[in-house]
Amino acid sequence: MEKNNGKGKEKSEVPALESSIKIMEYLSRYTSKERSLSQISKKLSINKSTCHRILKLLTHYRYVSYDDDSKQYNLGSYLIILGARAAELIDYLKLAKPHLKWVSDQTGLTSVLLEPVSHDRLMYVAKEEPELPDSPVQVTVKLGQHFPLTSASFGKCYLAFIEEEKMNEIIQTVNFKQFTDKSIIDYETFKDSLKEVQQKGYAVSYEEHTSGVFGIAAPIFNSAGEISMVIACIGFSSGISEEFVTFCGEQLMEAAGNIMKVTGGRKPF
């Protein structure tokens, strides 16, 4: 991978492998799940002939699929096998799932677990939807969906609990996108919202990423006291009271604390 040594970026030690990873990450996004060779090459700044050779190899091993009619690439079927195996082997997800369900049962909302998928994005890795008989229509999510770190409660929660230098670097790199008319796209306003997250211990967003949807998120720290995951609940924003938002935030912080107990995590302060 490229590293910054204070004198600029170093070249990747394994450029073909890094390009392969970038291609699969790019195709894993719902907004770019089907792309042509030219589109992939241009978007990822990979030489077209090199990109073609990598895609050919990834297709051979079924990490990527190719449609002869549309001339477009997509993720391949073998990743389903790897994903299922990873879910079986990653113990922390098994340990976290009961607490995710508890949040969903307590709040009547869809609860989710997210972790970094790259330096600037978070991804849904687990979810629980409420089973309450009197629960209203709920927000449904797709595992594997990515979110920029500068959007909604998930990203604000993550950025609020990392080192300030790294946080500033990510914000400047990712910048802001106007998803809705309530998206925060001003640097100072966004930084102020991070201070509020640090004070409360959880993040809240109202329709900042998706119209009609609100989210609340709390941090989960690893054994080194570094944020490693985000636990959140999401629902429709219509009729939501401040008291209910506070209640959800408290439930999420309790669940996050319980997950850290079983995974060996600890708060940094």
Image: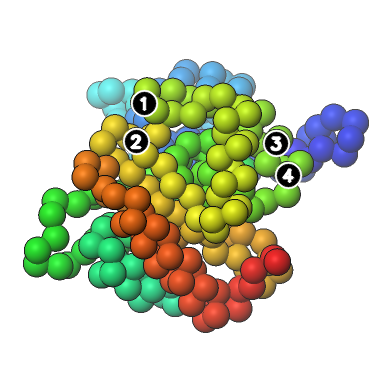
Of the residues under marks 2 and 3, which one precedes in the sequence? 3
- The residue positioned 40% from the left and 34% from the top of the image is 208
Q: Which residue is mark 3?
A: 168
Q: Residues within 10 Å of mark 4 (few under 14, many from 20)?
A: few
Rendered position, 111 above or below 77? below
Residue at position x 46%, y 20% in the image: 39
Q: In the orientation shown, which residue stands out farthest toward the left?
A: 133
Whole-angstrom CA distance, mark 2 to mark 1, is 7 Å
Q: Secondary structure at mark 4?
A: helix
The amino acid type, in three-letter code, at marker 4 is Glu
Residue 112: which quarter of the image? bottom left
Q: Quadrant of the N terminus?
A: top right
Task: From the image, state whether disc 2 or disc 3 is nearer to you.
Answer: 2
What's the amino acid at mark 2?
Answer: Glu
Residue ID at (62%, 45%): 195
Relative placement, left or right, of 50 versus 182 is right
Label 1 sits on a secondary structure element that is loop
Report, in whole angstroms, how far the alpha carbon at label 4 lies from the one at label 2.
Answer: 26 Å
Numbered badge on residue 180: 1
Q: Tell which of 15 and 199 is nearer to you.
A: 199
The single residue placed furthest to the bottom in the displayed view is 262
Q: Which mark is residue 207?
A: 2
Residue that carries the numbered disc 4 in the rendered image: 164
Mark 1 residue type: Thr
Could you say whether the residue bearing mark 2 is in a helix, strand or loop?
A: loop
Horizontal side of residue 179 vs 2, given as left or right: left
**Mark 3 vs 4: CB contact within 8 A:** yes
